[in-house]
Image (cartoon, grey):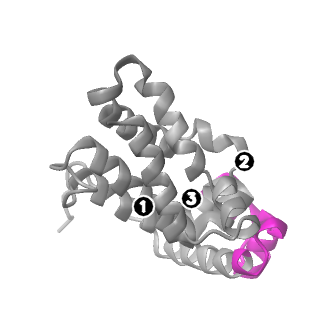
């Protein structure tokens, strides 16, 4: 008997496609860990033992490949931000939520900034992910900053860009705890 389709379910991935995806992501993770700036889509395909067309069709470009590598961590952060416990999730005052978002995102960057910086460049500002985080900040800022909220959201996102984070960690040698305290200070200067 044929199985009925489930409404709103993702299409089932062929076994060989799932295996290739897993191999590509494992190879990419290993190559990016060694030297993210030197990773090419061709090198990932060779390390995974698949054709480069497979990698390009599945991930599009380096940014798509990096996004796939960090997607589980990003989804977890977004779930905590949207549905999680306060202060990161709903239920806390805007100022506390902004500070919690900064702290959580700095921890996320501690794990993924090097990888993100190697692939994103200016495209980060145009990405759906940036738009989600920016919108979250705009909504929180509108409570106290009114019409300036969209601009101030970009101001609060600027130190959370991977290159800025890496500069603070590598050149200025600031710890994540110090960056979190500085971000809290920035929020305090914007919101009473």
Question: Residue 36: which numbered mark, if any?
Answer: none
Q: Are marks 2 and 1 in contact (CB under 8 Å)?
A: no
Q: Residue at x 37, y 61 (%)?
A: 77
Specify whether residue 56 is in view: no
Magenta portion: prevailing SS class:
helix
Image location (x, y in percent) of residue 52: 76, 65
Q: Which residues are magenta?
A: 32-61
Q: Nearer the viewer, mark 2 or mark 1?
A: 1
Q: Nearer the viewer, mark 3 or mark 1?
A: 1
Alpha-carbon span between mark 2 and mark 3: 13 Å
Give the mark nearest the N terminus, 3 or 1. 3
Query: What residue is disc 3 on?
Result: 67
Left or right, 129 with reference to 66: left
Q: Report if residue 96 lies within the magenta region.
A: no
Query: What residue is disc 2 on?
Result: 121
Left or right, 148 with reference to 82: right
Question: Residue 103: which numbered mark, if any?
Answer: 1
């Amino acid at each position: 008997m044929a199985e009925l389709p489930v409404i709103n379910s993702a299409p089932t991935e062929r076994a060989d496609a799932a295996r290739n995806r897993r191999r590509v992501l494992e190879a990419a993770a290993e190559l990016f860990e060694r030297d993210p700036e030197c990773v090419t889509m061709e090198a990932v395909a060779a390390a995974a033992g698949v054709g480069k067309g497979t990698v390009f069709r599945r991930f599009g470009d380096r940014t798509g490949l990096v996004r796939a590598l960090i997607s589980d961590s990003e989804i977890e952060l977004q779930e905590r931000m949207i549905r999680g416990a306060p202060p990161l999730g709903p239920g806390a005052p805007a100022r506390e939520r902004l500070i919690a978002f900064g702290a959580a995102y700095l921890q996320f960057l501690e794990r993924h900034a090097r990888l993100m910086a190697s692939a994103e460049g200016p495209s980060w500002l145009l990405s759906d992910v940036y738009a989600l985080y920016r919108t979250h900040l705009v909504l929180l800022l509108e409570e106290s900053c009114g019409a300036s909220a969209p601009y101030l959201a970009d101001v609060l996102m600027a130190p959370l860009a991977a290159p800025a984070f890496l500069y603070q960690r590598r050149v200025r040698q600031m710890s994540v705890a110090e960056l979190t305290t500085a971000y809290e200070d920035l929020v305090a200067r914007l919101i009473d």
